[in-house]
Image: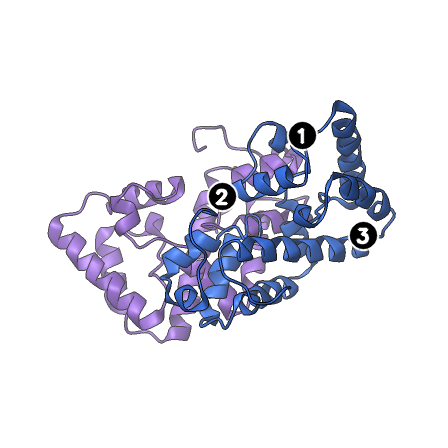
Chain colours: A purple, B blue
Amino acid sequence: MSSRAKLDVGQLNDLTFDEFFQRFQNIIEYGSLITASIWSHRPFRSAKHLHDHFCAFIDGLADDGKTGILLCHPDLAGKLSQAGKLTEESTKEQKGSGLLSLTDEERAFLQDCNEQYRKKFGFPFVICARENKKAAIMEGFNRRLKNTHSEELDTGIAEVKKIGWYRLTDLIEAESKL
Amino acid sequence: MSSRAKLDVGQLNDLTFDEFFQRFQNIIEYGSLITASIWSHRPFRSAKHLHDHFCAFIDGLADDGKTGILLCHPDLAGKLSQAGKLTEESTKEQKGSGLLSLTDEERAFLQDCNEQYRKKFGFPFVICARENKKAAIMEGFNRRLKNTHSEELDTGIAEVKKIGWYRLTDLIEAESKL
């Protein structure tokens, strides 16, 4: 998908629903329903405007929905990653941050962190790997494990929105930063 | 999936998130996010109780989200069906109602109805094929094409819930009817 030329805003608004749905289905991991829901809000003025609609949909969800969004994310350097079963987008992101080439010690450290985090919060640790290299991710685990459940629900969702922004701007020309 | 033994309620509540997500991911077509969101509401008392949570999540969505749910459904006997690209669940449902073995005239009639319906309402005609054979579906098109946008949003969503109930009770033992 990322090898295709990026769309400009005119092309974005010319897509049929099927084209729009296929291209943007995984802006939010497993969030096809969000992509389909955003469609009603055409025309979009910019990549940022489209992203705002993804964010508004997420913000409109109750805590069970926000938790559901986090639950749809894979563990960093976890089982799915080792089995090569991540989505195309997640593979690219985890690879870019160095998470697909770990030493045994690093992998053991991250697996331990994933477990502690899931045990405390009931959902996986979500971080925008495109903005964080391996060392920053490990530091993030240490810091965020001390947060409250409510703080981590908010932090995780903020990371989901950043991940979505990078995924969107792989596909559409963006004039602004997030 | 349907060849596996059905779960009883105890087994349902013993599933890990990954098992739950994989099994129930498509109770609502492309609605993985809904399935993940329902997880917070364990334990479930029955298939009906689980289904109630799917319905409550859908009812909590604004009109853009409900429209998004309808948009995720394929046209009956449409392009995806002819190309063999329906989800496993939709294939079974369309086949059961006779929609995968149409005469040329019937297919042309349905395609014309699909087009008229999409043009008027902006989303596809959704009907629970498990409760309707070919003739009833054709009659439904004629009747529902006369409805208002708001009536069809409600009718389509009510059909989505029925489809979800049949998909659920393929996977879990159910004592009650919907």
Q: Report which quarter residue B79 is drawn in.
A: top right
Q: Nearer the viewer, mark 3 or mark 2?
A: 3
Distance from the alpha carbon under mark 1 to that under mark 3: 30 Å
Q: Residue at (62%, 37%) from the top-left corner?
A: B95
Chain ID for label 1?
A: B
Q: Earlier in the sequence, mark 1 or mark 3?
A: 1
Q: B132 or A33: which is nearer to us?
A: B132
Number of other residues with Cα within 10 Å of mark 1, as a class: few under 14, some 14 to 19, many 20 or more: some
On screen, residue B81 above or below A58: above
Looking at the image, do the residues carrying marks 1 and 2 touch, with CB atoms under 8 Å apart?
no
- Type of residue at label 3? His
Distance from the alpha carbon under mark 1 to that under mark 2: 40 Å
- Type of residue at label 2? Leu
A61 sits to left or right of B122: left
Disc number for residue A132: none
Q: A84 or A140: which is nearer to us?
A: A84
Q: Which residue is mark 2?
A: A168
